[in-house]
Image (spheres, rainbow, N blue to C red):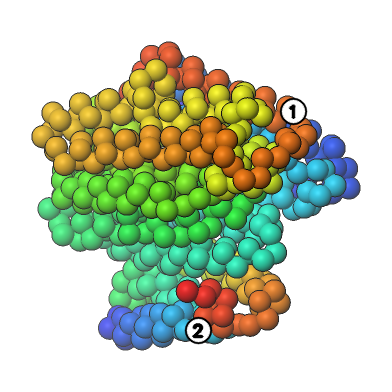
Amino acid sequence: MTSNLIVFPIILPLITSILLILCYKRLYFRRYLSIASLFLQMYTIIVLTTQVIKENTLQVLYVGGWDAPYGIALTFDLLSGIMTGICVFLAIITLLYGFGYTPIKKEHLFKLPLFFFMIAGIQLSFITGDLFNLFVAFEILLIASFGLMSLESRSNHKKYTYPYVALNLVGSFVFLVTIAVTYRLLGTLNFADMGVRSHLLTSDPRLWVMGVMLIFVFGLKGAFFPLYYWLPKSYPILPTPTGAFYAAMLTKVGVYGMIRLFGTVLPHSLGTLHTLVLVLAIPTMLLGILSAFSKKSMRDILCFNLISHIGVIMMGLGLFTKESLTASLFYMIHHMLVIASLFLIAGLIIKMKGSDNIENIGSLWKTSPLLSGLFLIQGLSLSGLPPFSGFWPTIGLIREGLSQGSYILVFSLLASSLLTLLSMVHILFRGFWDTQSPNVQKPVPYFKPMVGVAGILVLVSLGLGLYPEPVLKLSHDATEMVLNQKAYQSQVLP
Amino acid sequence: MSITTIYLIGVLTSCAIYLILHRSLVKILFGFGLLGHTANLILLASSGNPNGKVAPIIDGVSNSFVDPIPQALILTAIVIGFGVTAYLTALFYHIFQTEKSSHAEDIFPI
């Protein structure tokens, strides 16, 4: 089913960012324009997703009218729908919050345009059906994110963008080499055509080399075990609204790439590669969360938690059954909402107390009970306790891990979940309940609606935990669509 | 022809890695530039041995053409490389201005 609507999630942010640069003097108009553009984008995504659900087929667009293996095909399935939808939702939330966080006179003129270029890159990487186009999408979002990071961080912190830039440049180099290897091996870069041709080569060792290189590329983006060093160095230098968006979306782009390549494109019989992902998942889960205990700043602790939970998503990916992938996808949705809201809450604390160091904030429970309540809910949700949204995917992963007999994995998952709870309780005790704090100050007034914006996010994730049925079904259907390679190939290739 | 390209790729990659691991920011910048060009050469090598092939223009005489796709990919990669190099130059200049040094050990003390 062909549909021209597919380009809108990509070109709307591009047009918006150009408009935002052009009308640089009308500060309030820029803010209205950016929110309106995001809502329009949300509308097109909802229309596309309902079409996909109703017809149970992909939406495909052959750009420039060139048929599938020759030109670039944009494909929109349920997984793309979920990811693009959450991306736009989080963009709306973090932008609205950011409007309260930064006074309008102090906002850098290029902050909004760069943010929209980054969204364009993210959306293109979720929608494209071509490996080289995926590379281009990654580059768009990376260059925009480099720019945004060095624009938004404080002058003496700008040097910490260098580790992020350097590792991602190495990642881009390896991605280009992977593309060259793929093209030499399969003679095509279109996902559907790659799928058809790689099925003829399932026992070829060169296909495994390609797979390992892909794991490296997406692992670097997604902060997998030996490659996560850059993340806790660079994310905390961002102001919290932008940091929340980075933490929620940018690592998930790498995880999405893994799901797409191993689910839809490469043959499912590459068991060794799936085992490699599982082996990397264990240290990612444990080392990430253990490092969190050495940190005092809330944002640092959240960054290490983020790494650990990427490991949880990897576990579902490595087990590679329909149920485990469903659980992974659900976990990803839950995690994007929860980690973003925790960053936003940390931002509010910085506004109130001037710092997010848990040694200094002290007795927040007395001065702002609402904020403490929001943090309590999200902290428990992050560690996967029952009534909250983290519980459902975790129980799914444990059940799947036990039925596969991988007890070490289940043990690491439970351990990382327990350690997450401990690190959240650590923040709660020191930052919220401890009355012995040396410098208890009066709360500084801040823009009240920001709490409301963070509250919306908390309510959404609370709803996800109390009534998980529709999202569970959605992620189950999306997984089925991703894994159904025959249907994907027949719908993309004419 | 192919084997020469492969040797060249090896030499360029090792030079690029040597430069990236250097202390001076300027050399790091050159290292990343060189790494980008190495990637382009690898992409070029993926079109196969060019011996006895001609440019893909149909003239009715020759029937053995060079694959044009990798060249189109290289063109895109070069443009992206420009952007990244421009950004890195600006970032390094800013670091040099704030830190008053272009040596990695002064900027990131252990």
Q: Residue A326 or A267: which is nearer the viewer?
A: A326
Relative side of A108 to B25, left or right: right
Q: Secondary structure at mark 1?
A: loop
Q: Residue A452 or A145: which is nearer the viewer?
A: A452
- Separation (CA) of disc 2 from disc 1: 48 Å
Q: Quadrant of the N terminus of chain A?
A: top left
Image: A376 above or below A116: above
Q: Which residue is mark 2?
A: B23
Find residue A385 and report its horizontal and vertical position in percent: 36, 25
Q: Do residues under tags 2 and 1 come within 8 Å of each other at their CB atoms?
A: no
Image: A231 above or below A251: below
Give residue A259's mark: none
Q: Amino acid at mark 2?
A: Arg
Find residue B67 and report its horizontal and vertical position in percent: 38, 66
Image: A345 above or below A387: below
Q: Identify the residue at horizontal 15%, vertical 57% (top origin).
A: A204
Find residue A147 and report its horizontal and vertical position in percent: 64, 59
Q: Subunit of mark 1?
A: A
The quarter of the picture where residue B97 lies is bottom right
Find residue A317 and report its horizontal and vertical position in percent: 28, 39
Q: Amino acid at mark 1?
A: Lys
Q: Nearer the viewer, mark 2 or mark 1?
A: 1
Give residue A448's mark: 1
Asked whether the viewer can see residue B105, the reply is yes
Q: Identify the residue at horizontal 15%, vertical 46% (top origin).
A: A271
Image: B107 above or below A161: below
Relative side of A225 to A388, left or right: left
**Tally of marks:** 2
Q: Residue A40 or A167: which is nearer the viewer?
A: A167
Relative side of A225 to A248, left or right: left
